[in-house]
Image: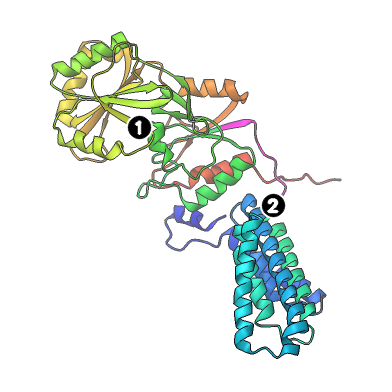
């Protein structure tokens, strides 16, 4: 369990996470290997290499291990070259310490340029550290060549221990035959920061990398969910806009869309205009979300346009809906009495029967409410059926905050609960039956 999991219980002090435990185990194993080697190496260097390899993700562990090994090899080779030159030239020529310092500094240029030539610039720091540890601290040793070898061997031992400890896990069965679908706001995200906790990020990405069938269902647009989910490696499409679209984050493509016909859209827009109001008309054009709007001088709508148009995933266009365009959904926000009056008009005109109309209080501005109007088939249940057909997975488990609508209810503020339960259901600990 990672440290942030403790915060879901409302405690200020989180428990010790698994990465911390693994780091301590790696340090202990380095000590044990050093005891077996009877002090022929320096355990400090093994421990540094091991700790460098203890990362949140296995992919990062392997990457860091390669960086450390390459850096150590380059630094050790140049350190050995320096020792050979010093033994053959420096001591016989009686070169002063200042000249020696200039040579060492010049070789740093050679080392760094070497990492550039072989396209391993990320290993440059370790190359310099190893080189300097040889030529500055141990050049006066009775057998500096032995130190070079042990320095290299210490690092290899530390890398092997660090990688081994970090990738070790208990044998567990992975339930890749379940499609997990979670809400976003008040479910997976922390309310204050509008982001996932560190615990949820690490564990969710790990399970996704191992093949978990997990995705998101939200009322947000793809543009709005991209920011909090940018670090999550989702493979499956997400259900967005309250079930109106199925969006592939990886390919940036709308796979399925429920739209309002142009004729019906014009009827809605005429009602909006008749009331002296305006709305945001969301249309998908070549996998781009285009939002048509009219400038009204309303302070709240001006604020919305100014804030949201900065997103690279939204395209605000100040004009009426073009002829023949189908609409994904309409959205308007006004003081609550205005919204209530307009909703009653929609009921009177039969719009609420033919289309899906959602009325809700604004969560960001007191006294305001909003209305969203979709195709009547724009429901997450329909998109889930499509996802099941697409993935071939029949069983689903849904997470949400509304009782009666989801398999697992998540209370607001308990953002780690989704990932915590997901772990238990996706990879339960394998219990072996006793043999007689």
Residue 366 lies in magenta, yes or no?
no
The residue wearing badge 1 is 314
Viewer-proximal residue, 120 or 190?
A: 120
| Image x and y of residue 201, in percent | 51, 48
Span shown in magenta: 169-179
The image quadrant where one finds the C terminus is top right
**Which badge, 2 or 1, comes first in the chain's sequence?**
2
Viewer-proximal residue, 107 or 58?
A: 107
The residue wearing badge 2 is 169
| Image x and y of residue 123, in percent | 63, 61
Magenta part mainly helix, strand or loop? loop
Q: Work out whether 181 lies above or below 432.
A: above
For label 1, count other residues whose C-alpha is less than 10 Å away and answer few (under 14), some (14-19) or many (20+).
some
Quarter where residue 236 is shown: top right
For label 2, count other residues whose C-alpha is less than 10 Å away and answer few (under 14), some (14-19) or many (20+).
few
Residue at 40% from the left image edge and 26% from the top image edge: 288
Residue at 27% from the left image edge and 24% from the top image edge: 292
Residue 277 is marked as none
Residue 176 lies in magenta, yes or no?
yes
Left-right relation of 299 to 126? left
Q: Nearer the viewer, mark 2 or mark 1?
A: 1
| Image x and y of residue 397, in percent | 54, 32
| Image x and y of residue 39, in percent | 78, 80
Q: Work out whether 234 lies above or below 86.
A: above
């Amino acid at each position: 369990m990672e440290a942030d999991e403790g915060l879901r219980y409302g405690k200020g002090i989180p428990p010790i996470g698994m990465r911390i435990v693994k780091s301590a185990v790696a340090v202990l194993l380095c000590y044990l290997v050093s005891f077996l080697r009877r002090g022929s190496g320096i355990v400090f260097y093994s421990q540094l290499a091991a700790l460098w390899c203890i990362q949140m993700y296995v992919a990062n562990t392997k990457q860091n291990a390669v960086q450390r090994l390459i850096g150590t090899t380059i630094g050790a080779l140049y350190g050995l070259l320096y020792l050979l030159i010093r033994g053959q030239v420096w001591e016989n020529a009686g070169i002063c310490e200042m000249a020696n310092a200039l040579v060492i500094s010049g070789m740093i240029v050679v080392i760094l340029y070497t990492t550039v030539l072989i396209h391993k610039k990320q290993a440059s720091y370790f190359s310099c550290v190893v080189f300097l540890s040889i030529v500055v601290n141990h050049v006066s040793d009775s057998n500096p060549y032995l130190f070079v070898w042990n320095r290299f061997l210490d690092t290899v031992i530390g890398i092997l221990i660090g990688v081994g400890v970090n990738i070790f896990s208990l044998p567990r069965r992975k339930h890749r035959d379940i499609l997990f679908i979670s809400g976003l706001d008040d479910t997976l995200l922390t309310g204050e920061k509008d982001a996932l906790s560190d615990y949820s990020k690490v564990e969710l990405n790990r399970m996704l990398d191992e093949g978990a069938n997990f995705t998101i269902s939200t009322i947000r647009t793809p543009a709005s969910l991209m920011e909090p989910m940018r670090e999550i490696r989702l493979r499956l499409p997400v259900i967005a806009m309250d079930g109106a679209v199925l969006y592939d984050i990886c390919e940036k493509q709308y796979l399925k869309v429920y739209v309002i016909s142009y004729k019906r859209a014009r009827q809605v827009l005429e009602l909006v205009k008749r009331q002296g109001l305006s709305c945001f008309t969301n249309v998908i054009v070549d996998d781009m979300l285009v939002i048509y709007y009219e400038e009204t001088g309303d302070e709240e709508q001006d604020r919305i346009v100014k804030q949201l148009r900065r997103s690279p995933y939204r395209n605000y266009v100040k004009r009426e809906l073009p002829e023949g365009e189908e609409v994904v959904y309409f959205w308007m926000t006004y003081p609550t009495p205005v919204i209530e009056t307009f909703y009653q008009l929609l009921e009177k005109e039969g719009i609420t029967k033919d289309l899906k109309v959602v009325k809700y209080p604004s969560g960001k501005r007191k006294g305001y409410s909003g209305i969203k109007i979709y195709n009547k088939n724009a429901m997450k249940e329909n998109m889930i059926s499509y996802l099941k057909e697409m993935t071939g997975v029949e069983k689903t488990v849904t997470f949400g905050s509304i009782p009666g609508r989801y398999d697992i209810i998540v209370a607001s503020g308990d953002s780690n609960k989704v990932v915590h339960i997901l772990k238990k259901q996706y990879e339960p600990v394998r219990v072996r039956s006793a043999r007689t």
